[in-house]
Structure formats: structure tokens, C-alpha cells
Amino acid sequence: DRTSWFEITVSSSNKVTATLKSDYLEKSSFYNRMYTLEIPVTLKTGINKATISNEASSITKLGSETAETLTSNSVNIDVFFNITVKHLIQGTTTSLADTSTVKAYYGDTYTTSKATVDSNYELVSTPSNATGKVSGNVVVTYYYKLKTATITVHHYIEGTTTKLVDDVITTQNYTTTYKTSPATVNSNYELVSTPSNATGKVSGNVTVTYYYKLKTATITVHHYIEGTTTKLAEDVITT
């Protein structure tokens, strides 16, 4: 590095000039060699684009965070950073939508938004860096989780909303399988039938209603001669 041998100036149009100091022109050791010049570039808030003309044969570096390393004699560069947006299932690295990357200039304001994802999922929360000002590369990660649904099970007397037992209410994630069953009710009642949605896959809130009816009994009346089963009249049977 022989940067100290040169006078480095930058014009108002951002033209960089490296002029060899006269003391070194007189030294024979200067000639027939290749030198490296380190020319620092400072970016200030509000500067979106930098044009650097390097008339010396040198390597000009913009710093580890920027997008380019310059090697040509005359270069125009955009000072930009990458804004990367990811859409992941909470607690995993599984993507629900494509990762996108856009370029933004230093000092610019950027805005991101959630994606349209599988309808079984919902956004956990908006990331704190969903919007901001560009000062370096940015990774914005939106996390999503499975929605939850309420499974409500009623146990009613047939034809009414009179409860034989309390409702059973649970919550489950979308896409999971739910199962319900009849309750142990008053022994005078019996189940009418099993509801068609007694089991299923959760895709929203579910209401399952079991209906019960009073059991029926048969009343049989005989008319016999005493001490026999000889009928004096036909049996009377009612329910």
C-alpha cells in the first residue's frame, strides 16, 4: 500500500484524483512496479447513488456491507443494499411463500408486507423491522401459525335446546382431526343417532349436536283364570 505517496482529492462531481507527490517522482525505485491505493468512501444519510471515477490503476473498496468491489479504471456504481423478506411457519425454517429480495439505496425508506399464504395459517405479528430506513442489508421475517378453531358439542333433548349435560368446548388447530362422542346422560334417555359431523377435519369453528329422547317401555296387561295362564280376554299391550 503506497497511498501515502499520493495526494487524493475528490471533486464536487465525486471524481477521485490520485496525484503522485513530487518527492517520489525522483526516486528510481518508484518505477516499474504495481501499487495498491486504498481510497475510502464515506456514505452519508441521503446519498442514494455514488459515481466514482478512478483514474489510477488501483483497487477501490466500498466496505464490507456494500454491494460492490471496484476494479476498473472508470466505474459508476449504485450504493445499494439487499432487503430480503421471508415468510416462515413459526418455530421452523419452512416457507409458506417465496422469499423475495429487492435492492434499496442507502438512506431510502423501505416497506414490506405479509404474504397471501395458505388459508389455514395466520400471521403471528408484524415484525419490528417491517419498515425502516436503509443503512445496511436487511432481513425481514414474517412468522405464521396454524389458525385455531372452537369445537362445541351440545347434548340436547330431541326437538329442543334443553341440555342434558353441559356443553363440551375445546380448541384445535386447523388441519387437525377432531372426534366427539355421546355423553353419559340421565338413564331415562337414549341417543337418537350419531351426528354426521361427529368427527372431521378442522377448517373452522364446529358445532356438533347430539340429540336424545326418552326411552320407551312396553306395558302388557293379561286377563287369566286364577292359577292358570288361560286367557279370559286378549292381552292389552301399550307403549
Image (spheres, grey):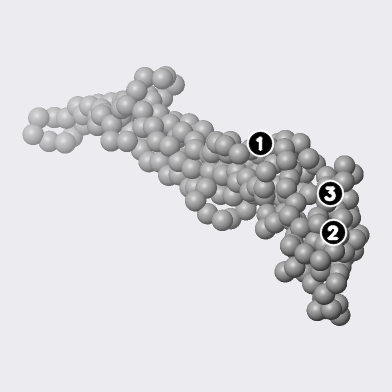
Q: CA distance from mark 2 to mark 1?
A: 37 Å
Q: Is residue 45 visible?
A: yes
Q: Which residue sits at x=44%, y=21%?
A: 159
Q: Is residue 228 left or right of residue 125?
A: left
Q: Which residue sits at x=49%, y=42%?
A: 173
The residue that label 2 is drawn on is 18
As displayed, is residue 234 above or below residue 34?
above
Q: Is residue 227 left or right of residue 223?
A: left
Dot 3 alpha-carbon crowd within 10 angstroms: few under 14, some 14 to 19, many 20 or more: few
The residue that label 3 is drawn on is 10
> What amino acid type is highlighted by mark number 3?
Val
Dot 1 alpha-carbon crowd within 10 angstroms: few under 14, some 14 to 19, many 20 or more: some
- Figure quadrant of the C terminus: top left
Instruction: Choose top left, top right, bottom left or bottom right for residue 20.
Output: bottom right
Q: Position of residue 126 (x, y in %)?
A: 58, 36
Q: CA distance from mark 3 to mark 2?
A: 9 Å
